[in-house]
Image (cartoon, rainbow, N blue to C red):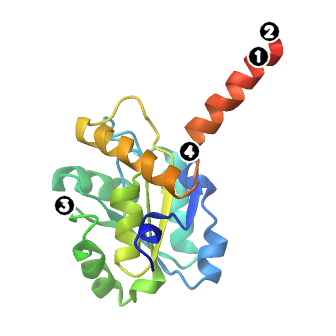
Amino acid sequence: MGFSNLFRPDQYVRTVYEVDFDLLWEQGIRGLFFDVDNTLIPFYENKIPPEAVKLLTDLRRRGFKVFILSNGRAERVRLMEKQVRLHGFARSGKPLRYGIWVLNRKTRLKGRQMATIGDQVFMDVLCGHLGGGKGILIEPIDRVRDEASVMKRRAAETKMLHRLGIRQFCETDSDAQSAASQKNS
């Protein structure tokens, strides 16, 4: 995989509910490692919505091994684990492979059998690729209110996506809004 392809998402969708899990299954993916903050819930909330709990439960029923993989604090990840009855890995060191390596050993999966799903190119997508699997990018739940360090990283991620020829949904949404307002003028 070339350097720039390490940052290219294998799927890029608006929400976790739009990920093509059937395609992932067909591609041999059996382990799904979900980020928490701004992927399943905004970083400032502590309750996973019922539709996310249902999604994660349904994915397990389909045969996927589903985990939380977060750079967040252990207390926060434990709180999420209880809500969705999944195991998690806090302070995982994303984008480094350590968290992936630990979970792969726990699940007996090979790197090519897993996918990380999250809202950051430089953390989630890169982690999936460095671990030998897929990196799925979703739009952040809340782009406006986010941690300061993440906001800085998002600006660099936008440049990287542009370099790869990928336009973010927020850009295409604003283009559509501009076109609609010009049409109505």
Disc count in the image? 4
Circle 3 Cα neighbour tier, 10 Å, few/some/many (<14 / 14–19 / ≥20): some
Q: Classify the position of the C terminus by image quarter.
A: top right
Residue 176 lies left or right of residue 87; in this view the side is right
Q: As shown in the figure, which amino acid type bears the numbered disc 1?
A: Gln
Q: Which residue is mark 1?
A: 182
* Residue for point 51% across, 46% down: 139
Cα distance in 3D space between marks 3 and 1: 47 Å
Circle 2 SS class: loop
Q: As shown in the figure, which amino acid type bears the numbered disc 3?
A: Arg
Cα distance in 3D space between marks 2 and 1: 5 Å
The part of the image, by quadrant, that contains residue 101 is bottom left
Residue 89 in the image: above or below residue 177? below
Q: Which residue is mark 3?
A: 91
Mark found first going from the N terminus, 3 or 1? 3
Residue nearest the viewer, comparing 145 with 170: 170
Q: As shown in the figure, which amino acid type bears the numbered disc 2?
A: Ser
Circle 3 SS class: loop
